[in-house]
Structure formats: structure tokens, C-alpha cells
Amino acid sequence: MNVLSRGFPSRSKHPRTATAQLERELTEPLLRRILTTIVFAGLALSAAAAAGDFWRTLALAIGNTAIAVLMLSVARRGHSQVAAVVMTLSLTATTAYAMMTGVGIFDDSLLIIPGLFLIASLLLSPRWLLLVIVLTMGAVIVIGVAQINGARAIQIPSRARYQDIIEILIILGSIAALVQYLVSMLRQIVLESRLAHQSVQDILDATSEAIFIHDARDGRIVSVNRPTLEMFGAAKEDFLGLAPKDLRATNPSYDGATAAELIRRAATEGPQAFEWMTQRKDGSPFWVEVALRGARIAQEDRVVAVVRDISARRKLEQRVREAETFRAVGQLAGGVAHDFNNQLVGILGHAEFLQDALEARPELRDCADSIVTSGKRAAELTRQLLAFARRGRRCNVPVDLHQLIAEVIALGRRSIDKRISIAEHFDASTAVTFGDPSALQNALLNLLLNARDAMPKGGTVRFATRLVELPAESSSQPEANDSTRTIELTVSDSGIGIDPDILDKIFEPFFTTKESGTGMGLAAVKGTVLEHQGTIDVTSTKGVGTTFRILLPVSDIEVPKETSNVTTQRGAHGRILVVDDEISVTKVVEMALTQGGYEVEVYQSGQAVIERCAAGPFDLVLLDVMMPDMDGVEVLQRLRAKTPSARVVLMTGHASESLEARMREFSDIVVLSKPFQPKELLLEIRKALAQS
């Protein structure tokens, strides 16, 4: 006690309410024990008196026993002070009656009075103790005077004198003072000890971490603080006596034996720290960080375990790891897309040549058509990977979402189950945003197909738009528009809904609940929305349906009206320099341009085409962005430095953000995304040559 209480304020410096509360906590169990003792002692005395035929003693014993039983019931109902006062006064009255009916001040019942002083000192306040002392002393004086004067016929071995009364009063007074001093000192020691213990417990409870006190010998828990109870959702009694193995989760990184060994090391070798998976009372697992340190507490070897819930931190670390993984996947997707799209140019190009050459052979033409279809599907998968990785090339033009939705709905009505109806509800007065119409159309089509799969027995898909106002700080607008207005586009279905357990996973790449599919559809949708400075979220109710909500910035720039396409018929002319290090691409491009009527020269390095351009005239350079010696943008910069009017069309398997930044100074340059088909290539070439 003195170790813990050292440095704490004395009893008089503690708040009165805290001291009074502790006194009640100490007095109430003590009162019940004293009353219980009186009951059993009274019963024993009653039995002895009955056996010895001492009827007066039997009556007094039964009376006090009955009063003790009654007061014990009163104390248990919360009236401890009343029970203590009544029992003390009852014993005082019994003692006085025994003296009066016995041999006066020489009666053995006088020996009860020191016990009364002790009970009163333990259970009552100093005022009540003083009253008991006054009553007992008064009873002694009255009975002694009556005995001396012969007022009562008391049979005594010798006649009492006033000196006897004075001696008894002195003895009783000394006993009363000694009892009060001893009890008061004992009470102060106990209170200070309890206050010191409570102060230490309050400090432990005020911490944010859970604290376990383990027995250093067997690792069993001997105490915990309040944050432990809150963290684990259990009561203090649930922990006491448990071993570390009782707290482990089903599949922990550390088993109970390892934890017990670490506790032993903390007691003998020094502090230990580790991460552990434990579980709450309801069985739910969670991760904690544990720091162990040996300590000597109350003359016992203990190990203090400070436990911190790190579930949120581990989730954040997991998100960081996932972000790093996604970034690596994005980098991998960009590299794969470049090489894969080059191969697809060869596949789609040669397949289109076969289509043209096999007009009279339908059975072989179907084979060529299948090659083109498969190639386009492969190209679509590549676009989805790039959209997820946010590495695809995105043109930035005004797009009317209402027109885009109408095109998606028209396509959907021709291709999905007739039991599925498609509705539209456009509340937005304007639905123009900046972005890539192909990417946005593909995202909406993905959502439509996802809704179709969620309604195997039919239902309704609903496209809706409206304008919403967002706070300026939360608005992500393009440079062309400073408005806080945002287009809200929702795609809802009346399908089976999404299980809440997987709702937060549906945008993850390669995650799918379908028997067939790549699991890239919704990941690509999210990538497209983020690329357009927007946000997307989802709500779903099992058996009711799912709603995807997309927010995109509004543009005030009008969508340009469509003009007639430049003809793609043969018979054009011009000298075109083709620069690409991939032979499969140059073969297709050379064949397509030659059939289109152009003169073609093929080069496989940037330096070679720069030297060629310095040697003679040309009409256009078709230039690949990624080449081994120098990239296409650098070649473009050198060509424009010498010939500012040079016409150039860039080709790329994928366009990174750095490429878009470098191309800002060349606003007239068309960037043609691979894979493309010969007809698409001829169209872009004719457009570029038609520019003044």
C-alpha cells in the first residue's frame, strides 16, 4: 500500500464525495458480515441458554437475533446506515438490561461494551460513536448509583462504591479512545490504499489502449482496464483467468503457444512487440498491436500488455498495397497494350483485305468476318484494361450525354432480351460534358449489359439525368468551365440486386460473379469516369435492384454539328512517309495506302525519316509514337522546327498522360489509336490532307 500511495494526496485532500463513496463501499460489506456474525452467535447462544435453562439469556439472544435478521434485510435494500444505528442501539439496550437484571456494574455483560465501541467505530460516524459512549457511560453511572444506594435489590458479592464506578468509567473511556484511534487509523490507511488503487485504475481506464496484466508464470490474465472491455465487447469477469490462447482468432498469425512464449520472454528477457489477430466476444476477428513489458506489481511478477486496435491501419495499408498493385497493373497494361495493339493492326488489317478479296466466296468471307470480330473483341479488352489503368488515349470534345444515352438505348433494344424494357427520364436541361464519346458510350453500354445480366427473367432498365449543384470545393470541373453545376446520370435496374458482402468489390479488376467474363467491365467504367473528372457510386437492395450514380462536370460549350465524312474511295494521291518499327503494322499501312492511291515510303526509325524529309518534298508523315531511337513527339518537334506546315498523323498503341501534356502545343495533330482498320486509316489520312 505504501508504495502505491506514496506521492498521492492524503485522505483529507481527496474530494469529500470520493471519500464518502469509498467509506460506503467499505462499510456496507462489513455491516453485512457483522450482522451475519450476530445472527449465528445469537443462534448459538440461544441453543446454549435453552440447554442450561437460562430463560433470561435465551430471551435476550432470540430478541437480538431477530433484530439482526431484520436489519440484515434492511441493509440489503440499501439502508445500511439505518441498520447499523438500530443494531448498535439494540445491543446497547440489551447490555444495560443485562446489567440491571444481573449484578449491576459487576455483571459480565459489562464486557460487551468494548465490542459496542468497536462496532460503532467501524460502522457509524463519530457523532453516533459519541452517542453510544454517552449512553453506555450513563447506563453504568445510573446502575452503579442505584446499586450503591440500594435502589435495586441486586445480589452482589461485595457492596459497590463510587470509586468502582469511577474506575469502570476510566477503563471504558480509555477503551473507547483506543478503539476510536485504532479504527480511525485503520480506516485512513484503507481509504488511502483504495484511493491510490482507484487513482491508478482511473489512469489506466483513461488511456486509449487496452491494457492486460498477465501472471508472469503462466500468462493468465489477472486484470484489465476499461478500454479492454470496450474493445472486446465483454465484461471484466470474462477475462480474468484466461490464457492467451483463449483470445486468439480462428486463423491467427500467432497461436496461443507463441503468445505465451512471448509473455515469458517479456518477463525474463525484456520488452516484446508483435501483431496478432484476436477476436471480440461476438467472435468477430480483428488485428491488434501488442507491446509486452515485465513489471513487479504488488510484490508479484507480472507482464503488462498494451494492446492497440490496428484494424483501420491494416485496412489502409491494404489499400496502399492494392493501389501499388493497380499502378503496377496499369504500367503492365500500358506496355502490353502497345505491343498487343500493334499485332491487332496486322490481324484486323489483313482480315479486312481478305474481306474485300473474298466478296465472291461467302464461305471464306465468313471466316474473314470472324477474324475481324475476334480482333475487335480483343481490342475492346485492351481498351478496358487501359480504361481501368487510366492510360488510354482520351479525346477531349464536347459530348451530349442525352444523345449518347439514346445511341446506347437504340443499340440495347436491338441486342438484349425483349423481356427487358429500357426507359429514359431526362430532367437535365443540358447534358454536355467534356470527354471521349467512345469511352463514355462504352461505359454506359457496360452498365446496360450489367443490368441485363441482373434481370434473367426480365425487368426495367432506367437511364435518368438531372443537374445538381455541388459546393465549389467539391466540384471537379475542366478548365473550360468554372460552373459548380454537375450532371447526375443514374442507371437503375429492377434486378436481383448485389449482395452487401461484395458491394465494395464490384469495381475491382478481374472480380466477377458471372460464370463467363473478364471481370473488367465495371473496373473499366470506374476508370473512364475518373478519367473524365467524375465520380461513381452504387446502391443496391437484394431482390429490389441496383442503381449506379455517375457525376460528371457540365460544359457550356455546344456540341458541333456533324458534317459529311470525307470519302474513303480509291483514287487519291500524295506522297506519304510511314514510320513504325513494327513490321506487321507497316505492311498493313503500306498495303492500305497503296490501294488507296498514295505513294508510300516506309521507315523504321525516327532519325531515318528526319533525314528523308530534309532530302525532298512529301505530303504527310504517318508517325508511330513509340520507337527505339526517338519517340514520335520528338520527331514531330524536329519536323515542325524545319517545316512548320508539315502534315503529321501520329499512331499509338496507348497514350500516356505525359504524351497528352507534350501534345498540347500541337493542337492540329491527329492521334490515331491502334488498332485501326484500313478504312479508318484512309479516312483519317484524307481528313489530314484535306486541311488547308
Image (spheres, rainbow, N blue to C red):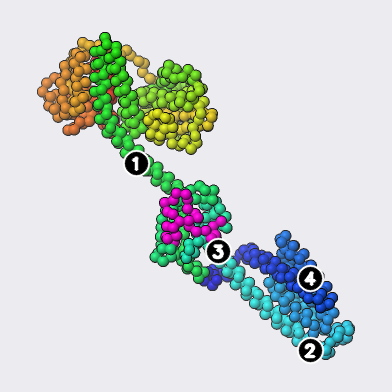
* Residue 251 shown in magenta: yes
Using the rendered image of the protein, determine whether residue 671 is visible from the camera's viewpoint: no
The relative height of residue 44 versus residue 318 in the rendered view (above or below) is below
Indicate which disc residue 199 carries.
3
Measured Cα–Cα span from mark 1 to mark 4: 82 Å
From the viewer's perspective, tell me whether residue 667 is left or right of residue 54.
Answer: left
Residue 191 in picture, x, y percent from top left = 61, 69
Measured Cα–Cα span from mark 2 to mark 4: 33 Å
Measured Cα–Cα span from mark 3 to mark 1: 48 Å
Indicate which disc residue 344 carries.
none
Q: Amino acid at mark 4?
A: Asn
Determine the image quadrant of residue 612.
top left
Residue farthest along the top direction in this orientation: 360
Query: What residue range appears in magenta?
Result: 238-263
Mark before the other along the chain sequence, 3 or 1? 3
Q: Amino acid at mark 1?
A: Glu
